[in-house]
Amino acid sequence: MTTDEPTESGHDPEGWTLTWRGIDPEEEGLREALSSTGNGYFCTRGAAEWEETDPPNHYAGTYAHGAYNRETTILGGRPVLNEDLVNLPNWLTLMLRIEGEEAITLDNVEVLDYEHSYDIRTALVTRTLRFRDRKGRETSLRSRRFVSMAHSHQAALEWVLTPENWSGQIGIVTAIDGRVDNDMVARYRDLEGRHLDPVTPRTFGPEIIALKVRTRQSNLYISEAARTRVARSRGRSWQAVEPKRTLHQMNDYIQQVLDLEAHEGESIKVEKLVAFFTSHDNAITETLTAAGRHVERYPDFTEAFAEHESAWTELWDVCAIDLPSEPRVQLLLRFHTAHILQVCSRHTARHDAGVPARGLNGEAYRGHVFWDELYVYPFLNFRLPEITRGLLMYRYRRLAEARAAAAEAGYSGAMFPWQSGSDGTEETQVVHLNPLSGQWDPDHSHNQRHVNAAIFYNVWQYYQATDDLEFLRDYGAELMLEIARFWASIAHKNPQTGRYEIHGVMGPDEFHEGYPGAETGGLRNNAYTNVMVAWICSTAPRVLDLLTASRRRALRSRLGITDAEIARWEEMTRLMYVPTHDVGDGHRVVSQFEGYEALEELDWEGYRAKHTNIQRMDRILKAEGDDPDRYKVAKQADAVMLFFLFSDVELREVLDRLGYGEIADDPDFARRAIDYYDHRTSHGSTLSLVAHAAVLAGIDPTSSWERFLVALESDVGDVQGGTTKEGIHMGVMSGTLDLLQRAYVGCDVRDGVLHFAPRVTTRLDGLRYSMVFQGTSLHVSVTDGELVVEVATEGFSHPVKVDLGGEVREMKAGDRAAVRLVDDPSHIPGPTELEHV
């Protein structure tokens, strides 16, 4: 029981801590996900180390990049193959036994005081607990832990335990538990969740226990070693104690019990240092030996934390976004930054890692890599581009598999999967469980071929931000050209219209898998896809032109790119079909896909009256025996994504070239399309909030900011009603960071120039952050109604071209440029309003 009612998460005055007070079992899973701590190599959920795993309330998951395993489940006589990011052995286990009694848990004591906090600055998880056991003994316990940002294989856990009104014998149970399954997500529990086979437990001297396991299909070895030490308080210092140690081990579990005397009022400190290795690691002979050797050399908790803190300080110097005039916004921006860096750090760049849509914080989406990297890279490109480079290599290394998939489907080039895991094969399920109906429905989402367009776009944006011609030459160009070839082969020319069309795909919407009543999935001419393809076909020749003549010849020869293919790309930039439909008063908007205008309108008000949350209208409709394919209803931004990814100038250029200038040149083109689809979108994905907030920044700043705030709160507030506990949403977290720099400050790169066109100016007072553009460090701030851009003097690389207010200037070390902000966010200041110092 508890005497302290739970409160909403709070924050400290400096805006660096999230705190939960009191116990709320229904919220524990969410708190565990939000207080996960990681270093870009592995990550552990913020579960209490003394609690047994009991989903959904307690789930001590640990996950590492690339640690996948495939299993088969028989469902209704049909074999269903699935690959999961594996829940790895639990290194957290640390429990207290008093006088040989059962271990203390929150269920068998009276909780007098309880606080769970997450220090954003260092990703440090702290719990403070006071409890009274069944014999009236009162005890205080402070627990702290981190996964080291300084050393990728290191984690640490510390207890300070104080008997308040008793003395007696205690036992500290420290263990590594390999008896774990993937069992977090309820809708996946019909699928096989056993992924680990035991190999061996082992000790390295009296202080160190270790465990080695292996994934059942992928043959990945994982080893963890833990060194546990105890000390007593002696005045202001600690004195090491050697307790009596009792070992117990099985083939998939190993523990020590450390027995010692506890004295009233005297604190006892327990330190558990952990080493984590997999057989994917470099410079090791064998994982178990490496884990034991490293943990033996680790310093104590205090020194290890100091190194960890120093590594985080360096990251914050580069990545911090400060907005002191909006304390809650600033807190959550920092919180999102910390989580992005715990999944994608400099350690990540040294591994074969993609960006799991739910990070390394849970088992939703089975740890697969989707297109969410589209939202992640913009933040990293301008701060830690070496991480983006490493993550893009995940795609390049799977290019052969993408080529094979395209060939098998009858296409040229490379066709990347919608869901990717270990080797780049398609991991999308063929059936999907609807939790509202309990039925397994067909899943056609593998038809979301627009992931190919996202990969092309990501490589180009990375190059634009970094000028990394070496990457483009050696890897990026090949990726992009093979993707362009795929689109040229999947498109066909309609002999009646003379335009190129693409059939059998899905857009980002996801509610529309096909046409009403159709036996096969896929749509004709998804506008987002077709416009992206037209842009890709215009960009691919530019990529070739950036290469040296010898590299261009070699690449064209190896890939077999003919002049006829390049000519087809050029033709597709002019002749791609983009469906449009009339919305009244003689105005037209881009149709989400061909035939969209013939769909029925949904009774939005009726469904809002019946359901407290209609974000997943697809599940609601299917549970009623209806079909979302019948209606003008979208899960998330689809056609609107075009306005999110491209500036007005870029999008108009693409549409003008395609012959749709009449629509594109309409001054209300964007406003009309965005408003039309906004009224028909349930925003069932948090990514939709980011996209709509961004596109509304220059149209309806009030609505834009409101959506930005909802996006900021979406994970910490679990706005989707239970999804965040299954893993944080990488896309929305990074998307909110990108919103500040791209939508509100108006920062984007075109043709080697860094442009600034600030929006929502009344909310930006005091904003400051650093960024790196093509290797040169810049400082951006909003002060006294001015947007100021300064070129750093330290670490300076070379002059860069910056556009403020429509005037392009070449800025060198120490230069400062400022543009006066205006109240009308749709107004871009002209050169006469620019002050250059």
Image (cartoon, grey):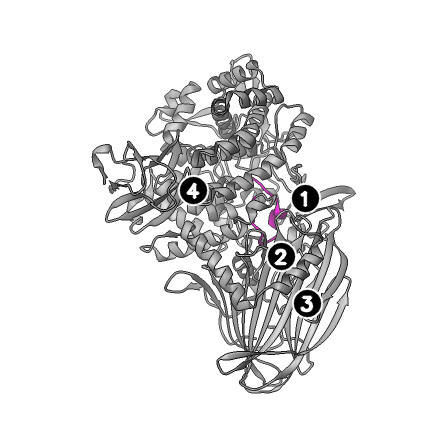
Q: Residue furthest left?
A: 832
Q: Amino acid at mark 2?
A: Thr
Q: Contact, CB < 8 Å: mark 1 with mark 3?
A: no
Q: Which residue is mark 4?
A: 382
Residue 115 position (above or below residue 640): below
Quarter of the picture holding the C terminus = top left
Residue beneath the point at 39% across and 60% down: 15
Q: Which mark is residue 208?
A: 3
Range of magenta residues: 355-370
Q: Which residue is mark 2?
A: 62
Q: Contact, CB < 8 Å: mark 2 with mark 1?
A: no
Quarter of the picture holding the N terminus = bottom right
Q: Contact, CB < 8 Å: mark 2 with mark 3?
A: no
Pick whichever, 375 or 670, lies toward us.
375
The rendered magenta stretch, by its main secondary structure, is classed as loop
Q: Which residue is mark 1?
A: 440
Specify the quadrant of the image occupied by residue 304: bottom right
The image shows residue 645 at horizontal and vertical percentages of: 44, 34
Labels 1 and 4: the sequence-earlier one = 4
464 left or right, relative to 30: left
> Does the segment drawn in magenta span residue 506?
no
Residue beneath the point at 64% across and 67% down: 227
Residue 184 position (above or below residue 648): below
> Does the segment drawn in magenta span residue 360?
yes
**Residue 470 in sight in this render:** yes
